[in-house]
């Protein structure tokens, strides 16, 4: 009987050891991290750039005559913004554009992801470091740029977006020699119906034009499916421009320039016409 009891004790002890090993194995497996989470998708380039294509260089190609005053005034105002933005954003926009050609790695600080790469803009060599850090239900983005033999790790712009990339903003500094924030870009997009909007707002502290903005949007409206709203703080004036991206027909409303609140139209050849 004692011999049988000792065997029973040994069997029970062995079973207990096996259970402990299995439990330990289960706990260890449960504590191991999941497969590394992929990096978030970068917001599209269109969230930073307004599309000026329908008015870009059109003044030179078509000329402005007395029959194209309506379209010409719209093109002139759009062109002013195009020139300003193209000059001021060349380096950071080039950095952002190159990010789509590179893969992310886990950020060395253990928080989020990093895209790091070299690129060239305006004949100079740069290194860009784009980071993405989870915040609440979204992502915070930061772009730091270093110029070869020049400034280092300059935070040229940062922003936030929701996870599904339907809305967000960017904030840009002027340049490394004048690092004050001067432009906010607010954007929305709805890929299902093709609607989107991008607004540039001047945010230079104390600047005379602080609050001035241009907004570009596309939609499915008829008869016009694209628009610019251009507001000047110093003039306290809103210019509204609407046109069709395919036919190029459109109209503009600018009380300060035309002296009335009417729409002033042009046809597909950009010639002035009476609005219907």
Image (spheres, rainbow, N blue to C red):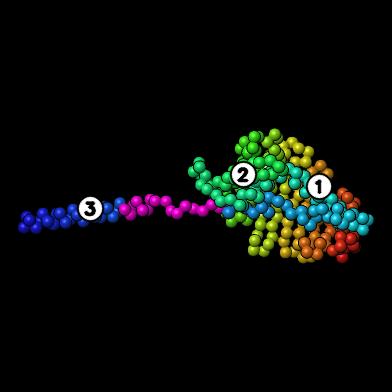
Secondary structure state at the residue bearing disc 1: helix
**Bounds of the magenta segment:** 25-40
Secondary structure state at the residue bearing disc 3: helix
Residue at x 62%, y 42% (from the top left corner): 127
Q: Marks 2 and 3, Cα distance to the nearest angstrom?
A: 57 Å
Residue at x 84%, y 59% (from the top left corner): 251
Above or below: residue 203 compared with residue 167: above
Q: Quadrant where the N terminus lies? A: bottom left
Residue beneath disc 2:
118
For label 1, count other residues whose C-alpha is less than 10 Å away and answer few (under 14), some (14-19) or many (20+).
Answer: few
**Left or right: where does residue 95 sit relative to residue 55?**
left
For this rendering, which residue is in front, 80 or 258?
Answer: 80
Residue beneath disc 3:
17
For label 3, count other residues whose C-alpha is less than 10 Å away and answer few (under 14), some (14-19) or many (20+).
Answer: few
Residue beneath disc 1:
80
Whether tag 3 and tag 1 are in contact, CB under 8 A, the answer is: no
**Left or right: where does residue 38 sit relative to residue 87?**
left
Snapshot quadrant of residue 155: top right
């Amino acid at each position: 009987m004692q011999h049988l009891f000792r065997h029973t004790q040994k069997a029970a002890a062995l079973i207990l050891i096996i259970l402990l090993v299995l439990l330990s194995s289960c706990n260890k497996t449960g504590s191991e991290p999941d497969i590394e989470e992929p990096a978030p998708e970068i917001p599209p380039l269109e969230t930073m750039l307004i599309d000026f294509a329908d008015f870009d260089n059109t003044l030179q190609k078509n000329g402005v005559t007395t029959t194209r005053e309506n379209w010409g005034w719209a093109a002139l105002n759009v062109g002013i913004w195009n020139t300003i933005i193209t000059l001021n954003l060349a380096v950071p926009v080039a950095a952002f554009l190159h990010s789509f050609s590179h893969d992310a790695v886990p950020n060395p600080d253990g928080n989020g992801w990093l895209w790091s790469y070299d690129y060239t803009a305006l004949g100079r060599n740069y290194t860009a470091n784009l980071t993405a850090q989870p915040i609440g239900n979204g992502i915070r983005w930061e772009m730091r740029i270093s110029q070869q033999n020049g400034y280092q790790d300059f935070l040229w712009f940062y922003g936030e977006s929701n996870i599904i990339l339907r809305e967000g903003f960017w904030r840009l500094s002027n340049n490394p020699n004048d690092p004050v924030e001067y432009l906010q870009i607010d954007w929305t997009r709805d890929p299902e119906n093709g609607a989107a909007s991008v607004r540039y707002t001047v945010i230079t502290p104390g600047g005379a034009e602080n609050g001035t903005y241009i907004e570009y949007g596309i939609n499915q409206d008829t008869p016009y499916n694209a628009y610019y709203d251009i507001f000047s703080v110093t003039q306290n004036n809103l210019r509204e421009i609407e046109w069709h991206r395919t036919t190029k027909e459109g109209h503009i409303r600018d009380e300060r320039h035309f002296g009335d609140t009417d729409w002033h139209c042009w046809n597909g050849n950009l010639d002035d016409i009476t609005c219907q």
